[in-house]
Structure formats: structure tokens, C-alpha cells
Image (tube, rainbow, N blue to C red):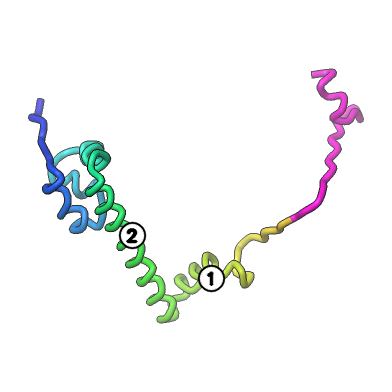
Amino acid sequence: MSAKKNISVADILPLIEEHNGNVAAIARHFGVGRATIWRRIEKSPVLQQSLQDARETMLDNAESALYKAVLEGEAWAVCFFLKTQGKNRGYTERQEHDVQGSLHIELKWGDGDTDDHASETA
């Protein structure tokens, strides 16, 4: 059985930024499973904040890369951007309808009975 590793906040903290919040990469660095790193992060508000910051930075980077691709005319990026950000202008693959008012549905069974009698025979 392998010896238990004592991994400190100070050990993990710089790796969160270095690995862009990738917990699996941090775990590989120490030769432990992701669950070990997650348990340590859950106990430390400093690590939790650092992880959140690193992941927000990656999200910002991804958005910047997408914007760049859109501005360069990359068709996939333009399509993706319009589908996700242009819904209010009609760029969507499905139609969404906001229906207000009442709706009456009557179910008829094969024998002609309506749903009012369904509970009597069930």
C-alpha cells in the first residue's frame, strides 16, 4: 500500500493557475487521484477561490478566441455565435413560443371513453 501524501494548500495553489483549473492535471502532478485534490480544495476557501478564478479566466480566454474567430470570418464560429448569442434576432435552430391562456386537452381511449372514466377502469 502506498504512503498517504500530505499535500498542502501552498503545494496546490500555484498549480491551479499553471494548469488553468484542471484538477486532473494537478492530481497527475502529485501522482494522486482527482478525489484527493478535490477533498483538499473543499477544505480550503483559498483553493476554492483560486479554482473559480482560474476557470473564469479560461472562460474569458475561450470567449476571446471565439470572438477572434468570428471577426476572422470563420464560418463555424459565426454560426455558433449566432445560435447562442443571436436568439433574440431569430438565429435559432428551434422555435420557442411563449403561450399564455388556458388549454383544454381531452384524451380518448380506443373504446371512445374520455379520460374522465380512466380512473374507474384502471
Q: CA distance from mark 1 to mark 2?
A: 22 Å
> Seen in the image, is 92 located left or right of residue 45?
right
Vertical position of residue 4 compared to residue 120: above or below: below
Dot 2: within a 10 Å radius of its alpha carbon, few (fewer than 14), some, or many (20 or more) residues? some
For the magenta stretch, what is the residue range? 99-122
Residue depicted at x 90% and y 27%: 111
Sequence-first tag of 1 and 2: 2
Q: Which residue is mark 1?
A: 82
The type of residue carrying mark 1 is Leu
Secondary structure found at label 2: helix
Residue 92 location, x and y as percent? 60, 65
Task: Check the image and report above or below for 122 versus 36.
Answer: above
Q: Which residue is mark 2?
A: 56
Does the magenta run of residues contain 98?
no
Viewed as shown, does residue 112 lie left or right of 105?
right
Q: Residue furthest left?
A: 3
Determine which quarter of the picture holds residue 72: bottom left
Q: Secondary structure at mark 1?
A: helix
Report the magenta stretch's main SS: loop
Q: Which amino acid is tagged 2?
A: Glu
The answer to whether residue 88 is above or below residue 102 is below
Question: Quadrant of residue 20 in the image?
Answer: bottom left
